[in-house]
Amino acid sequence: MSQEFDIVVIGAGPGGYIAAIRAAQLGFSVACVDDWTRRDGKPAPGGTCTNVGCIPSKALLQSSENFERAGHGFAEHGIAIGGLSIDVAKMLARKERIVAQNNDGILLLFRRNKVTPFHGRARVAGRSGERWVVAVDGPGAAELAATHVIVATGSLPRPLPGVAFDNLRVLDNAGALAIAEVPKRLGVIGAGVVGLELGSVWRRLGAEVTILEALPGLLPTADEAVAKEALRSLTRQGLAMRFGVTVGAVGAGPDGVDVAWRDADGSGQQARFDRLIVSIGRVPTTAGLGARDIGLALDARGFVEVDAECRTNLPNVWAIGDVVRGPMLAHKAEEEGVAVAERIAGQRPEVDFGTIPWVIYTAPEIAWVGRTERELGAAGVDVRVGSFPFTANGRARAMGETSGFVKIVADAGNDRVLGMHVVGPMAGELVEEGVVAMEFGAASEDLARICHAHPTLSEATREAALAVGRRALNI
Ligand code: FAD
Ligand code: NAI
């Protein structure tokens, strides 16, 4: 006998759990099925983001940044620390506690919003009249029936061809967030977001880190000046990066991982690492969902095919987040989750991919929204640009974090803000002003005329906006 709902959401990552809550707020009866399980067997909703992504990586970034500051940053403040050490087990236990708080928080939100959680693996079994039947296997085995299904099954790390993750020597993101002791030599394949963030964590704790990247340069989608400054800062911190690399044989054994590669100039290289993080992107999760049996269309790369409003080819089946096209970001998944719930309720929300911010939580942070000067140039848009360095910002000087700048790109004709690019302290917080400006169709002059508190990092944004009109005041 099926349990009846208006909507069944499959997956409780940031896409799924937010979709479930918004749908419940709108008056629907909602079930949310998720298979993530804690070591003690309990459900661990929150998906990749909460369990092995955004949240634990930021916990370790914070711990390692504190260690780095205590070791190298405090001395200039007159603070001397003797006998500095890192207890990795304690650091990892703190990370696990934060993850568990977030898991529990989502279960609490489900209770508050009357979302019914199911713990197990969901398969769309077929139609029963106008309703979809969803079979749940696992601890919370059940049969559910619903008018609408929202697929929010997320993504998994992409392995190197022929090299399986063992999470002992060859690590995916989960393994890279759980290394029990600081490796002496850490290899990282892929200088993308995971490689830079987790490479930074273990570098700050003392590992020698070598990052091997296939592309000829760092962060090709970022603003060129931002990428250049990021490369300078990260290299200065000791991250050894090699670009234009072709990775060859990878062999894991009891003493380490041997990696062979060809450098950009064609020369053959070889190194042994204690651990190897493979962070070369992620692939959509559709295994076990029953996609083929019900005729759910996937694209050539395995993503669930959706239109601009997250509708699949099947009636009342929607898909959101990492399992569909677009950036693999938690906040993009959330936006799509809210939008689908509201569309089911007959509303007409919009998700604008053009104003989704990117943040890379290295030190300095890297963040941007909108298009780069180069992209706009290539599209034939005339722009005016203003930049302001943190070396000229009083708060950044007081913090001792002066590397980087804010850059604002505006339309040369009507002055509308088309992009904001930041490398520097708290870039991820600062960029939100650019998101708001773009969403409201603001001109750079609007930003320049808004009062910003002194002394704050956000004054650098105002100065960059003033610089668009060639009238920065503090430089
Ligand atoms: P997921 O979070 O992957 O959740 C999908 C859930 O569905 C999982 O729990 C999965 O087990 C479950 N599931 C799958 N199939 C089934 C099934 N058949 N039945 C039941 N359950 C199923 N993004 C950011 O925006 N900011 C960051 O700082 C950030 N940091 C990251 C750091 C790392 C190391 C990684 C790997 C990713 C990071 N991301 C970050 C990306 C972010 O984690 C993803 O974009 C986000 O989690 C996608 O959300 P989702 O809901 O689509 O899927
Ligand atoms: P990524 O797509 O960011 O980077 C992968 C990198 O690996 C690319 O630079 C690519 O050129 C390189 N690469 C691919 N194949 C290679 C090969 N064979 N040899 C050498 N280099 C190779 O993917 P990543 O870092 O795995 O992260 C996955 C996703 O998770 C990201 O796209 C991002 O959306 C999300 N994420 C977001 C974070 C944030 O918002 N702060 C943090 C971490 C992850």
Image (cartoon, grey):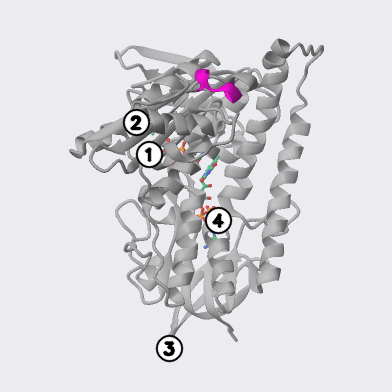
Marks 3 & 4, CB-CB < 8 Å contact:
no
Pointer 2: what residue? 468
The verdict on residue 54 being magenta is no
For the record, the magenta segment spans 390-396
Pointer 4: what residue? 14
Circle 3 packing at 10 Å, graded few (<14), some (14-19), many (20+), is: few
C-alpha distance separating marks 1 and 3? 58 Å
Task: Name the side, left or right, on which 362 lies relative to 322.
Answer: right
Q: Where does the image place residue 211, in percent across and percent down from the top left?
A: 47, 22
Pointer 1: what residue? 445
Q: Earlier in the sequence, mark 3 or mark 4?
A: 4
Looking at the rendered structure, the kind of residue marked 1 is Glu
Q: Earlier in the sequence, mark 2 or mark 3?
A: 3
Q: Which mark is residue 129?
A: 3
Label 3 vs label 4, nearer the camera: 4
Label 2 vs label 4, nearer the camera: 2
C-alpha distance separating marks 1 and 2? 8 Å
